[in-house]
Amino acid sequence: MAVISIVGTSGVGKSFLVTQLASLDCMPAFLEGEEGVIPQEVFTNIFAGDPVGRYAYFIERYNHNLSRARRISDLGLDAYVDGATLSPHAILLYEEPQYHEPIRDITKSMAGNESDVIVLLTASEEKIAQGLEVRGRSSEATAEALRRAIAIQGYFEAEAAKLDNAITVDRTGLDFKDEKQLRDIAAGIKDFLKR
């Protein structure tokens, strides 16, 4: 079966969609995590400090999740993952150029840890702002956090366009609590996998 990764910028609803799609058909889900799971210093580091350590943390997490998801898919179940090899490559483009080379070195550890399909979630600026507000992270309650999220969405779109295993879902008008909409997204993923 398939490893299905959901990716996108902050506040777009990746974790929620992973959980909802996995729950829809009782499939396994692997999440990036929230406060209490992700160390507070990693959250703080998103807007200040050395991004290399932050990337090392998330890439280790992505590798762990993708490896476990692959083992499960090899047993005959679909597995949903929050994140993919695309994630650090897209977000890297937002970082200052002096950090690009050391971060690229870290991302090399993800080689071969690929998803069968990558679902890029996008949304309007208003929807992303709403998502950041609902999450309630103090580090994201700034105009800079929203600017960063919008810029990173653009990088995700540019990087996903280079891949043949990526599809885009604009969630601006979607409600991930609506079963029909969730089933439509799941069907779109299945159809894409059949190509």
Image (cartoon, rainbow, N blue to C red):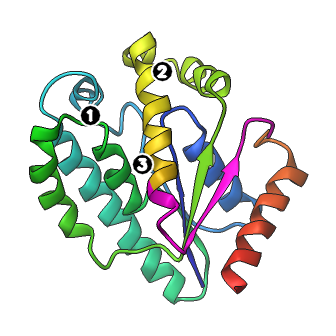
Does the rendering let one see residue 51?
yes
Q: Secondary structure at mark 2?
A: helix
Spatial distance from mark 3 to mark 1, Cα to Cα? Answer: 12 Å
Q: Earlier in the sequence, mark 3 or mark 2?
A: 3
**Residue 23 percent location from the top left of the image:** 70, 58
Q: Mark 1 Cα within 10 Å, few/some/many (few <14, many 20+)? A: few
Looking at this view, is 156 or 84 the one in front? 156
| Residue beneath disc 2 | 146
Q: What is the three-letter code of the residue carrying label 1?
A: Pro
Residue contact at pointers 3 and 2, CB within 8 angstroms: no
Label 1 or label 2, whichever lies nearer to me, is 2
Residue furthest to the right in view is 180
Q: Which residues are magenta?
A: 159-174
**Image vertical order of residue 163 relative to residue 156, above or below:** below
* Secondary element type, mark 1: loop
In x, y percent, where is residue 89? 32, 54
Task: Name the mark on residue 82.
Answer: none
At 32% from the left and 65% from the top, the residue drawn is 64
Q: Which residue is mark 3?
A: 32
Nearer-the-camera pick, 25 or 99: 99
Residue at screen point 22% across, 46% down: 55
**Residue 45 higher or lower than 13, as above or below:** above
Q: In x, y percent, where is residue 61?
A: 31, 55
In the picture, measured across the screen, residue 95 lies left or right of residue 136, that is left
Q: Give above or below for 73 relative to 63.
A: below
Question: Which residue is under mark 1?
Answer: 39
The stretch drawn in magenta includes residue 125: no
The amino acid at mark 3 is Glu
Position of the C terminus by quadrant: bottom right
In the figure, 163 relative to 122: above or below? below
